[in-house]
Image (tube, rainbow, N blue to C red):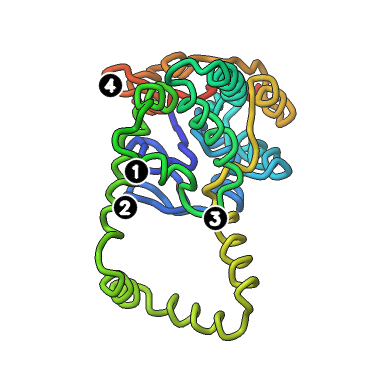
C-alpha cells in the first residue's frame, strides 16, 4: 500500500510518506498543511492523521478533509483520530457531580477534565495549565491522567518536568544562551520593544502563539466528524477502536497502539471512511 501520515510528529513509519511542519527525522518532510497536501490526485491507498484536525479552525477543516479525499485513490481509506469531545464532556459532568458530592479523588479529576476541555483552547502560552499541573509531586490522580491520555502522557510529563528543571538555572546563563542561539530573534525583539507599547507587544505575543498550531481550534464528536467526512465526499464513516481498522495489518503499524497493546492517545475518537 501507498500510505500517507499527516502531521506525524515523531510517530511515523519509514515506509510511508510522512509530513509535519517541524520534522524530527530525515524520513519526515517539512510541510505546512494549511497550504494543502503536496501530492497529485489519487496517490494514496491510505491517508492517516492523528490529533491534527482539531488544530484547524472550523472554517478551514472542510478544505483540509477535501484535500485528503483528493489525494486518495478510489476505494482508499481515510483514518482520523481526534480528541473525543463527547467523552470529555461526559467525564467533565461526571467529575463535577462527584466533586460536588466530595467523593475522595474527584476534585483532582474535575480540575483535570476542566483543563482538558477548556485550557486546550484558551491557553496563551505553550502547554498552558499543564505545566503547573505536571510540576506537582506527586500528581495526585496520575492513574486517572494516564487512563485519559494513554502512553503519550509519559514523555510529555518528562519533557515538562525537564524543562522546569532547566529553567532553574541562573537567569543570566539562560539569557546569554538564548542570545547566542537566536541573535536575529533578539534583535527583532529589541526593535519591536522600541516601536510598540507593552500592551501591543503582549497582543502580538498572544496572537503569534495562538496561530502557532498548538491549541485546539475546534472539537469533534462521532456525529460531527462523520458529517464532515461525508460532506467532503467520503462514504461509510465508521467509528472504530484503536486496534480496529479496515486497513490491512493496521495493528502492526503501531501508530494508535504500542507493540504491547497499550493505547498511545487513549482520549481519541477513531473514525475511518472510504473514497468511493
Residue annotated with mark 4: 259
Residue annotated with mark 2: 164
Q: CA distance from mark 4 to mark 2?
A: 31 Å
Tell which residue pokes out farthest to the front in this image. 102
Q: CA distance from mark 2 to mark 3?
A: 22 Å
Q: Are marks 4 and 3 in contact (CB under 8 Å)?
A: no
- Please identify, in this view, whether the residue under mark 2 or under mark 3 is nearer the observer: 2
Q: CA distance from mark 3 to mark 1?
A: 24 Å
Where is residue 8 drawn, in percent x and y? 43, 40
Q: Residues within 10 Å of mark 3 (few under 14, many from 20)?
A: few
Q: Residues within 10 Å of mark 1 (few under 14, many from 20)?
A: some
Q: Are marks 2 and 1 in contact (CB under 8 Å)?
A: yes
- Please identify, in this view, whether the residue under mark 4 or under mark 3 is nearer the observer: 3
Kind of element beneath mark 1: loop
Q: CA distance from mark 2 to mark 1?
A: 8 Å
- Please identify, in this view, whether the residue under mark 3 or under mark 1 is nearer the observer: 1
Dot placed on the residue nearer the N-terminal end, 4 or 3: 3
Residue annotated with mark 3: 212
Lateral position of residue 140 relative to residue 276, left or right: left
| Residue depicted at 61% across the width and 48% down the height | 36
| Residue depicted at 63% across the width and 33% down the height | 219
Taking depth in this image into account, of 36 and 121 the one nearest to the observer is 121
Q: Residues within 10 Å of mark 2 (few under 14, many from 20)?
A: some
Q: Quadrant of the N terminus?
A: top left
Amino acid at each position: 500500500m501507498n500510505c500517507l501520515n499527516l502531521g506525524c510528529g515523531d510517530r511515523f513509519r519509514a515506509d510511508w510518506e510522512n509530513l509535519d511542519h517541524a520534522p524530527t527525522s530525515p524520513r519526515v518532510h517539512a510541510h505546512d498543511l494549511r497550504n494543502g497536501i503536496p501530492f497529485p490526485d489519487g496517490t494514496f491507498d491510505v491517508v492517516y492523521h492523528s490529533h491534527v484536525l482539531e488544530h484547524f479552525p472550523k472554517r478551514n477543516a472542510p478544505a483540509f478533509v477535501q484535500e485528503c479525499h483528493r489525494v486518495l485513490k478510489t476505494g482508499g481509506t481515510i483514518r482520523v483520530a481526534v480528541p473525543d469531545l463527547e467523552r470529555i464532556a461526559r467525564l467533565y459532568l461526571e467529575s463535577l457531580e462527584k466533586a460536588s458530592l466530595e467523593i475522595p479523588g474527584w476534585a483532582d479529576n474535575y480540575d483535570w477534565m476542566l483543563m482538558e476541555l477548556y485550557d486546550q483552547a484558551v491557553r496563551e502560552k505553550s502547554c498552558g495549565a499543564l505545566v503547573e499541573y505536571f510540576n506537582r509531586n506527586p500528581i495526585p490522580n496520575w492513574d486517572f491522567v494516564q487512563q485519559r491520555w494513554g502512553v503519550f502522557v509519559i514523555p510529555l510529563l518528562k519533557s515538562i518536568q525537564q524543562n522546569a528543571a532547566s529553567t532553574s538555572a541562573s537567569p543570566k546563563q539562560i539569557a546569554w544562551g538564548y542570545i547566542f542561539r537566536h541573535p536575529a530573534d533578539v534583535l527583532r525583539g529589541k526593535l519591536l520593544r522600541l516601536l510598540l507599547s507593552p500592551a501591543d507587544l503582549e497582543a502580538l505575543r498572544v496572537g503569534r502563539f495562538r496561530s502557532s498550531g498548538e491549541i485546539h481550534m475546534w472539537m469533534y464528536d462521532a456525529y460531527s466528524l462523520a458529517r464532515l467526512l461525508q460532506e467532503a465526499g467520503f462514504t461509510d464513516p465508521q467509528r472504530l477502536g484503536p486496534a480496529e481498522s479496515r486497513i490491512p495489518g493496521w495493528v502492526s503499524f503501531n501508530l494508535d497502539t504500542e507493540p504491547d497493546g497499550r493505547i498511545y492517545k487513549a482520549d481519541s475518537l477513531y473514525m475511518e471512511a472510504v473514497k468511493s
